[in-house]
Image: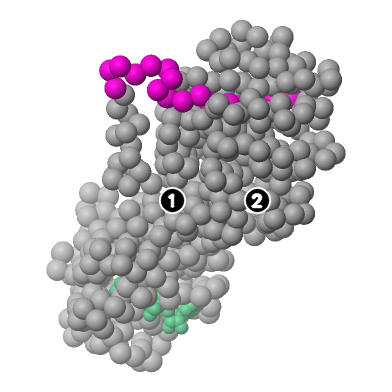
Amino acid sequence: MYVVNADEMRKLDRHTIDQIGIPALVLMENAGRATAEEAAAYDGRRLRRFAVLAGKGNNGADGAVAARHLLEAGCTAELIYADDPAALQSEAAQQRDIAGKLGIPIIRYAAGHIMWHRYDGIIDALLGTGSRGVPRGDYAGLIREANASGLPVIALDIPSGLDADTGEAYEPCIQADVTVALAFTKCGLEQEPGARLAGRVVVRPIGIPAGLAAAFGVRTYRIDEQLLTDRLGLPQYERRSANAHKGTYGHALLAAGSRPMAGAGLLCAAAALRTGSGLVTWALPDALLAPMLGRLPEAMLRGMADAGRGDWSAVAPQSLYELAEDKAALAFGPGAGRWPGDAEWLRSVWTNTRCPLVLDADALNMIAAADDFAAWPRRTAPVVMTPHPGEMARLCGLDTAAVQRDRIRIARGYAVRHGVTLVLKGARTVVACPDGDVYINVTGNPGMATGGTGDVLTGIITGLLAQGFTATQAAALGVYLHGAAGDRAASGRMYTASLLAGDLLDVW
Ligand SMILES: NC(=O)C1=CN([C@@H]2O[C@H](COP(=O)(O)OP(=O)(O)OC[C@H]3O[C@@H](n4cnc5c(N)ncnc54)[C@H](O)[C@@H]3O)[C@@H](O)[C@H]2O)[C@H](O)CC1
Ligand SMILES: [K+]
């Protein structure tokens, strides 16, 4: 499913009108009718009396059309404008006049004068993809009163006050129960807090040919079963040949864990096995080998000479890249810890290994600390990096809040600049590819915000790479399966918060 930003939507809109010749009024009619249909059907058709909050742009014009179609559906509707209705222009003025001729009351908003008890529901047609920044003047007042009314809200295209590109919510922002996304879902509806403020998102066609998205270079996708199957090859994952043997599905190498954080390696290795990797070797500091023996009998353990330190600081990098020579994928970082000179250590592993490489946790902090990462040699085999927002902030020299305000753009920029597949974790994980494609994951739940779930994801992605999936497939499918496992594990628990990372391994 394509996901568009405001600029892409504007271009698709204009091309449809100017080049294909579908008049704006036709698109508007379809937009308004779709919104009215969703509103009239909401909650078992319980809502009958609507306040349609309208701005002066085309979002408001769509709202005036919706008001008309609500009448046709046996409802009542009143148009409440955040601007002087007499100042409206072009299509917005046209739609206002048509609504007026059909007896729909045209009301100018005045703070504290709206009698909200007269309505059952609200249509938010104040601001759409043309909105910029904090809602101004009466737009803000109307948004606050609508939110305070306690009435169900159906947002037209996007909740007013939401950034259509990033999902950032300005103050105030409409809290919608349903958002009728016109033609395509928007980036801002697929990232938090936008996803929460949008409520249930319904994408409704309005006449813009869906095939235009590809033609216009839209490169952002929402991961769903169809995309995984059509674009990323999910059937390949589910189907196994009858004469398969463990060599068929690759050998994954997980270099992870150190004395205080041995469990990270255990979770990684177990996840790689669960994902179907034929063989798994867990490389860990020698001092940890004995206590870890038998904890995961299905994995082969390989102690790395650590001078008794129980961490990676004395492990010769050559010993790791020699071990990686016959492996199908290597992951490094979970529970690895830091030590002086670790960035140089990692650079030599980066340079001297030939298989796909997954870097997570402290490996990412090492890269963030390296002042010459941009000069590291481009690897022929792919690299997948899996930062959480804090690690991403360190990689980009930003603060975490700045990363969270613009996740898609920041992840895409980093992936393209460094030629890596970048998995920016968090709610609605963003998978950004070196070619600029971005996939947004919608599985998962807040219970997964607990230690170790990142280690599980690293193991999943490494296990998929070991089976021969491409970096894009392994990352997109990996985050989807990881979140789905988290949802299934949470459904069996009394509280989402009680979820443990290990629970994700028992539901495959
Ligand atoms: N193909 C489609 O998606 C179609 C979309 N349509 C609708 O058009 C809007 C976008 O309309 P546009 O006129 O570009 O902008 P808006 O209506 O979103 O509002 C802009 C309007 O409001 C003023 N404004 C901007 N920011 C603020 C602010 N922070 N506070 C106050 N006022 C603000 C600005 O000056 C403009 O006047 C899209 O969402 C759809 O609903 C088409 O109608 C059908 C095809
Ligand atoms: K809106």
Q: Which of the 4 image quadrants contains residue 345?
A: top right
Camera-side mark, 1 or 2: 2
Helix, strand or loop for disc 1: strand
Q: Is residue 442 magenta?
A: no
Q: Is residue 246 magenta?
A: yes
Q: Residue at x 72, y 40 (%)?
A: 348
Distance, label 1 to label 2, CA atoms, is: 26 Å
Residue 426 visible? The answer is: no
Residue 223, relative to residue 495: is it above or below?
A: below
Of residue 138 and residue 248, the one placed in the foreground of this image is 248
Q: What's the magenta region? A: 241-258
Q: Which of the 4 image quadrants contains residue 19?
A: bottom left
> Can you give x and y, in whole percent of width and height, for residue 144 in the image?
50, 66
Determine which residue is flagged by label 2. 377
Determine which residue is flagged by label 1. 439
Disc 2 residue lies near ligand 1 with CB under 8 A: no
Q: Residues within 10 Å of mark 2 (few under 14, many from 20)?
A: few
Which amino acid, by three-letter code, is at mark 2?
Answer: Pro
Q: Which of the 4 image quadrants contains residue 492?
A: top left
Residue 119, relative to residue 485: is it above or below?
A: below
